[in-house]
Image (tube, helix red, strand yellow):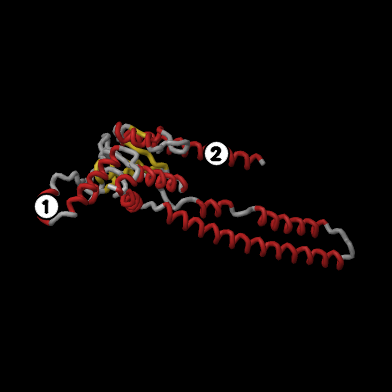
């Protein structure tokens, strides 16, 4: 009873889960015979202990989504992953949920961020080395020019000036043309997925630990350019998410969708809009360069 009073529970789901565990603990304190006879009345969720996680794909020309490993007909849309768990999200399986999400989607934000930081450091070293080499080349070129001018007894030669200016100009271009494309290559996430849809249709409740874990995972994916959306949340789950402060300025209710298909349409439209905007910017940039 002392343990129960020391633990603060925020939702009814938390209390029910704790009561179930509390009953199980009381049973374990009795004899083995009582354990066998009294275990059945306990509200013990088997799927919470051994949950199943799957990636869903769409049956062509329908709004039905099934497990891609069980049905050959279903197809995944490029750039979008649909992840589903057959259990609720609470303290006992929250870490397992995130681990399965990373494994099934093939995207580990932590590993990607570590790889990007290593690439940043390597790129910074290479850039520093390149600048030092260019600086030495410019200094050597300047000394050669000064010596040539002395030998020519201050004789202005247009060809010499032109060649010197051309060499200096090329050196300056090499220095000022910092490899931004190379930097973008290093900094861009090495993934081809831009959206993940979490199907919460089987989810009956979430607790405070589950909400905290979910928010943390969504933040990590956001940092590597992957949007996470929720679909199929029932009224109880939405109420729990709201009461547990899941929504804030970074996570709004706009990411909730009635079904997987609705979320899929949103992701497709957003991806096509981004691609169109990017192509227009490239055309505008090329036109500006050609005019210059």
* Numbered tag placed on residue 89 in the rendering: none
Residue 58 shows in the view: no
- Relative side of 36 to 48, left or right: left
| Residue carrying label 1 | 34
Q: Residue furthest right?
A: 153
Which residue is more in the foreground, 27 or 86? 27
Image location (x, y in percent) of residue 264 = 35, 37
Q: Residue at x 59, y 62 (%)?
A: 125
Q: Secondary structure at mark 1?
A: helix
Q: Which mark is residue 281?
A: 2
Q: Is residue 157 left or right of residue 272?
A: right
In which quadrant will I find the C terminus?
top right
Residue 38 vertical placement versus 124 (above, below): above
- Label 2 secondary element: helix
Q: Residues within 10 Å of mark 2 (few under 14, many from 20)?
A: few
Q: Position of residue 256 (x, y in %)?
A: 36, 34
Q: Write down the quadrant of residue 288 in the picture.
A: top right
Q: Quadrant of residue 232?
A: top left
Image x and y of residue 150, in percent = 87, 66
């Amino acid at each position: 009873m002392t343990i129960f009073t020391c633990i603060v529970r925020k939702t009814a789901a938390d209390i029910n889960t704790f009561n179930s565990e509390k009953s199980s603990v009381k049973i374990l304190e009795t004899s083995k015979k009582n354990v066998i006879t009294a275990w059945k009345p306990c509200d013990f969720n088997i799927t919470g202990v051994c949950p199943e996680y799957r990636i869903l794909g769409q049956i062509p020309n329908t709004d039905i989504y099934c497990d891609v490993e069980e049905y050959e007909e279903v197809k995944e849309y490029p750039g979008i992953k649909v992840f589903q768990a057959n259990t609720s999200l609470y303290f006992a399986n929250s870490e397992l949920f995130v681990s399965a999400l990373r494994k099934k989607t093939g995207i580990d934000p932590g590993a990607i961020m570590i790889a990007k930081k290593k690439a940043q450091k390597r790129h910074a070293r290479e850039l520093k080395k390149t600048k030092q080499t260019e600086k030495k080349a410019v200094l050597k070129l300047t000394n050669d020019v000064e010596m040539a001018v002395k030998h020519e007894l201050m004789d202005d030669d247009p060809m010499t000036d032109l060649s010197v200016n051309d060499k200096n100009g090329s050196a300056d271009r090499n220095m000022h043309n910092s490899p931004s494309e190379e930097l973008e290559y290093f900094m861009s996430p090495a993934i081809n997925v831009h959206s993940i849809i979490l199907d919460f249709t089987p989810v009956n409740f979430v607790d405070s630990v589950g909400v905290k874990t979910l928010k943390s995972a969504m933040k990590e994916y956001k940092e590597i350019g992957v949007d996470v959306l929720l679909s199929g949340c029932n009224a109880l789950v939405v109420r729990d998410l709201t009461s547990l402060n899941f929504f804030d300025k970074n996570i709004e209710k706009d990411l909730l969708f009635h079904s997987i298909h609705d979320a899929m349409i949103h992701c497709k439209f957003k991806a096509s809009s981004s691609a169109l905007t990017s192509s227009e910017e490239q055309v505008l940039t090329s036109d500006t360069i050609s005019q210059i």
